[in-house]
């Protein structure tokens, strides 16, 4: 079995929580203080209905990092009566959600990332929202924390669409300590933009000239000449040719 953070994340994205539990347990055996693996394990326990194991695991995270916002939030959630409602919000996106649709969806790498602890605590599939702030479009977590910004060129484009009535939904697609990618989908297009996609196609088709093999010659053609084609020249001066 391939044991790595990415395989654990992939299992979670696929909703294969039992597999996610196995992988994260193996990772924790190698490093019992791996806070991210513990958070993933607790999440998997929670999704399979093992609330007690989830709570204990989150509490272990807080023993290692008492300011861990994900663990603190979920411990409080487990102890509250809002757990069943919150599970629908926390459940990660299924793979079909990330299917690309030209002009309607786009995977975006954020710039000017927010607090590293907040970003690293995210999980693929978590919902995010976008909001216009000045000339920028910021990305906000479900708990209201700032995560980062869209690149300037895309911000400029989407600000116009958002103010014009378009609506969008987003989800975390991948995350590591120095990078955060989100998957953004247009969910409503205002009639004034009915023929204008939110995310224009940028791929260009290239065509290569093709010459049939039978017309390609590796050697230069031989040129034959006859005596009639050859101009005669004399070694003597013109006045001596009488």
Image (spheres, rainbow, N blue to C red):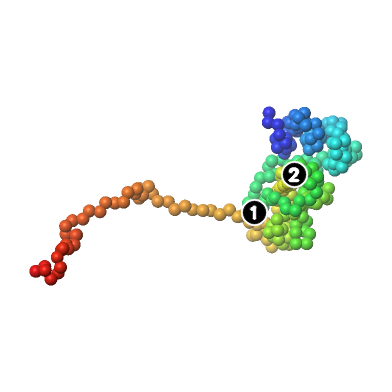
Residue marked by disc 1:
103
Q: Quadrant of the C terminus?
A: bottom left
The answer to whether 235 appears left or right of 200 in the picture is left
Q: Quadrant of residue 227?
A: bottom left
Q: Quadrant of residue 79?
A: top right
> Is residue 11 something one can see in this rendering?
no
Badge 2 element: loop
Badge 1 element: loop
Give percent across and percent down for residue 131. 78, 56
Give percent across and percent down for residue 236. 14, 65
Q: Earlier in the sequence, mark 1 or mark 2?
A: 1
Q: Is residue 240 above or below residue 140?
A: below
The residue mark sitting in front, 1 or 2, is: 2
Residue marked by disc 2:
177
User: Residue at 60% across / 55% down in the picture?
Assistant: 202
User: Residue at 65% across / 57% down in the picture?
Assistant: 197
């Amino acid at each position: 079995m391939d044991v790595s953070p990415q395989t654990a994340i992939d299992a979670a994205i696929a909703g294969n929580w039992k597999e996610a539990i196995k992988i994260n347990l193996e990772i924790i055996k190698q490093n019992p203080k791996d806070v991210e693996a513990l958070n993933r394990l607790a999440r998997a326990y929670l999704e399979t209905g093992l609330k007690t194991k989830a709570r204990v695991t989150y509490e272990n995270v807080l023993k290692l990092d008492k300011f861990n916002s994900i663990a603190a939030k979920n411990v409080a959630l487990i102890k509250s009566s809002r757990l069943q409602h919150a599970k629908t919000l926390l459940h990660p996106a299924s793979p079909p959600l990330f299917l690309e649709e030209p002009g309607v969806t786009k995977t975006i790498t954020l710039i000017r990332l927010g607090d590293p602890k907040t970003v690293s605590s995210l999980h693929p599939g978590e919902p995010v929202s976008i909001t216009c702030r000045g000339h920028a479009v910021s990305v906000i977590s479900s708990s209201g924390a700032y995560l980062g910004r869209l690149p300037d060129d895309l911000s400029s484009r989407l600000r116009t669409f958002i103010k014009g009535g378009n609506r969008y939904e987003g989800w975390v697609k991948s995350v590591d300590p120095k990078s955060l990618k989100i998957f953004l989908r247009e969910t409503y297009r205002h009639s004034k933009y009915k023929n204008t996609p939110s995310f224009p196609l940028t791929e260009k088709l290239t065509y290569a000239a093709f010459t049939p093999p039978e017309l390609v010659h590796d050697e230069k053609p031989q040129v034959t000449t006859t005596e009639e084609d050859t101009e005669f020249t004399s070694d003597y001066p013109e006045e001596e040719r009488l």
